[in-house]
Image (cartoon, rainbow, N blue to C red):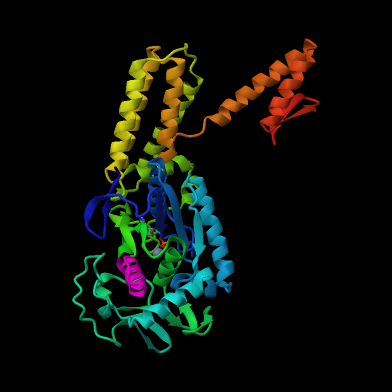
Amino acid sequence: MLKIYNTLTNRIEEFQPINPPEVRMYVCGPTVYDYAHIGNFRTFLFADLLRRYIKYKGYRLRHVMNITDVDDKIIARAVEQKKSLREYTDRYIQYFFEDFDALGAERPEEVLRATDHIPEMIEIIKRLGANGYTYQSEGSTYFRIAGFERYGRLSKMKFEGNVAGASERVDADEYDKENVRDFVLWKAAKPGEPSWETELGEGRPGWHIECSAMSMKSLGETFDIHAGGIDLVFPHHENEIAQSEGATGKQFVRYWVHAEFLMVEGQKMSKKLGNFFTFRDLIAKGHTPRAIRYLLLSAPHHKQLNFTLEGLRGAESTVERLNDFKRRLTELKAEEGSSPAIAELIEQSQRRFEEALDDDLNTAEALAAIHDFVRETNTAMAQGAVRAGDREALLAMIDRFDSVFNVFGEVKQELLDSEIQALIDERQAARAAKNFARADEIRNQLTAMGIILEDTKEGLRWRRK
Ligand code: AMP
Ligand code: ZN
């Protein structure tokens, strides 16, 4: 049974979806004003691990992620570069997914852009108005937090509901707990800024309303999991709850899950502090996506993780070792049969792996189980104790580990090269022996595998389609 820390209740709870085997999860996505840094990717890779483990447990997952393609920072940059919002953000969305894919993250079932959901946002703001939670001032619409009794419950803020009305407002998308105010739902248009003509007047959405609109549109008014980085607890998620529950009168989300920060020398990795690396910075330094992935997943999400290049080099040799292990096991020439000791090792390793992840996704412990499994299998291989049947079962176990972590690396590609060459050699030998039936058979097999043979002056060459 998966147990997970819920920020809302401040407890580790058994995970019980509303409508099993279905699980509905929303993850706050990137604000696409620049390249994402690897601190951002710590959160997205944690969401990927959560996603993969939910599926591993046999649930049917519906995972939605938004793209914040309108906010203060984006508008400032787009205006500065004289680009339309769409043109400016399209580019960074593309870069984001290039990095996301390269880091081995699975795409959510749905990715939604804020600017495609303005009518849904207006609809919620109107419902909030009808329920008495909003007021207008200078063309903008605000949420009156004093009217929402549960305000502050997620972030455990000491809020006594004593915030005064009209003078205590905040228009900025981001602000801190010391600055708690009525927040903006719809901002009046400003000259030179992008805006939408709506029933609430010409303007643009505040940051928080987009996630209420998109999550409820895709997942319903109450869903299972909402995730993001720890800095989203306040104000973003607190405000999402106020907006959604204020509109529907129903509980918005059952489990709130947050990933702790990636740190650099005691400080949060952030654009503002300038202490960040992007994925591309690290690739340019010669690091591999798989090692970056490994490093970011190596600490449990409820703990801060200190980033160092030395740590990344360590991850680099770890994933190389895992990759090498998988290759040797794949290529092992083993006798027929299987042994109970290996079956026992697999069973124990799997149990440990699952217990670790069931325990609030303790990735450090789960990886320790994998490393012990690798060590013991190595010993067994060295003793010649791994039979053909064991090898298949061990490889299947690696695939199960990897369905969650995706860090072992693909050995198929390299194997294929040698397999292809062996088939080609065999085909040449068959032709020389005038065994054309066999030669044709091999050519067909290669074609089916997407391999094209070419006769060149230098002899027979092959390439992938
Ligand atoms: P943003 O693009 O700024 O909206 O951030 C995207 C995600 O990255 C959010 O869930 C943030 O909470 C998360 N995030 C930002 N900085 C860090 C960090 N240093 N470590 C982990 N997550 C972070
Ligand atoms: Zn959000």
Q: Which image quadrant shows ligand 1?
A: bottom left
Is 245 rendered above or below residue 37? below
Indicate yes or no whether the magenta region holds residue 245.
yes
Dominant secondary structure of the magenta stretch?
helix
Point out residue 268 in the picture as x, y percentages from the top left corner: 32, 57
In this view, which residue lies farthest toward the front?
19
Please give the range of residues in magenta. 234-251
Q: Identify the image quadrant of the C terminus.
A: top right
Is there any visible trace of residue 185 in the rendered image? no
Left or right, residue 242 beside residue 159 = right
Residue 197 in picture, x, y percent from top left: 53, 82
Query: Which percent across, then down, holds residue 3?
Result: 27, 46
Q: Quadrant of residue 444?
A: top right
Task: Using the image as rendered, state which of residue 433 and residue 315 is in the foreground.
Answer: 433
Q: Is residue 371 left or right of residue 328?
A: left
**Residue displayed at 79% across by 26% down:** 455
Q: Is residue 20 left or right of residue 280?
A: left
Q: Vertical placement of 367 versus 42: above or below?
A: above
